[in-house]
Image: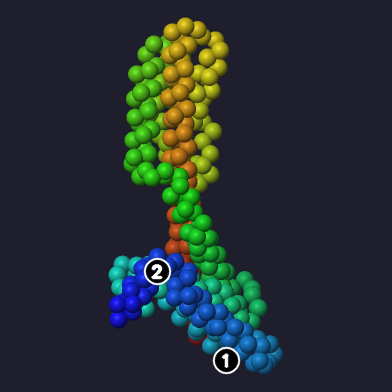
Amino acid sequence: MASRGLDRAEYGDAAAHESFLRYRRFRWFKIGAVLSLLTVVIYMLVDVQPRHNGGSWLGYTLGTLGALLIFWLSLLGIRKRAMTRGRWSLKAWTSAHVYLGLALVIIGTLHTGFQLGWNVHTLAYVLMMMVILSGIYGITVYAVLPQGLSDSRSEMTGPQMIEAVNSLDKQIQISAQPLSDEDSAVVLGSLGEDPFGGGAWRRLSGSYPKCGNRAALAYMRQRLDETSGKQQIAVEQIVQLLEKKAAALTRLRGYIQRRALLEVWLFFHIPLTFVLIAALVAHIISVFFYW
């Protein structure tokens, strides 16, 4: 009995750390794969004259299945607000969302009968594929980036990384006092720089060509060869502090970039989902209107 209890405890601990992609040994991957394969087999075996199309009985069946899946998949955002365990846990629901969403590629494509045109029906199909592609991007970044996000933090929180930059700014300001007016102006001009500045593109690319700290560091390194005595000692101290700040900014901006890459897909996936539902409703209404 004790051994059985231990096994259950170990299983529960393993389940708690199990990825939603691997949920219950890829349960929803298998379900999605079987559903896709079954759809393909039926499509190949059924003879529709003159050719497969969305208006045949099979087309209506696949269309109904696809529409139900789309409406159900769109409920994930609502589902996230409810905390439950077991087979209807958020992890299970997310796993089903991913694999049934991928199965929708097969179901939706076969529903069209590979007949596309400039109409609301094709618009719904294209929007569906765009939503799925944005979802695939989301899956990819969530599978790849979290480890890099953790590494970039160096066991520091976001506020702690910002505070580290601000602390270095204060040290640089104090250390810049013995410098000449010209040197001091260059160094002090790099202080208080917004590490988030540059807009969304800067965050996503991680490129900050107009970084004031980088410019000040390059200038002060050059000044090392042009100074001597106490002035050179002061410049060396500033260079060291600017190098530390450069490392802190690199760590902070790397963290910001990974966070942005993790989140940017949602700005496409969620709005596209609402547009898809609107197009799908228009598609369904038009089908019944002309039926």
At x 41%, y 20%, the residue is 188
x and y, in percent, of residue 154 in the image: 42, 43
Badge 2 marks a residue whose secondary structure is: helix
Inspect this view and state whether residue 111 appears.
Answer: no
Residue 214 or residue 291, whichever sits in front: 214
Q: Do the residues labelled 2 and 1 touch (CB within 8 Å)?
A: no
Quickly name the residue at label 1.
57
Question: Which of the 4 image quadrants contains residue 249?
Answer: top left
The image shows residue 170, relative to residue 147, as above or below, that is: above
Residue 94 or residue 189, whichever sits in front: 94
Q: Residue furthest front?
A: 2
At x 50%, y 7%, the residue is 228
Comes first in the chain, label 2 or label 1: 2
Badge 1 marks a residue whose secondary structure is: helix
Inspect this view and state whether residue 174 appears.
Answer: yes
* 12 displayed left or right of 238: left
Question: Which of the 4 image quadrants contains residue 178?
Answer: top left
* 157 displayed left or right of 47: left
Number of the label disc, if any, that sits on residue 14:
2
Which amino acid, mark 2?
Ala
Number of the label disc, if any, that sits on residue 271:
none
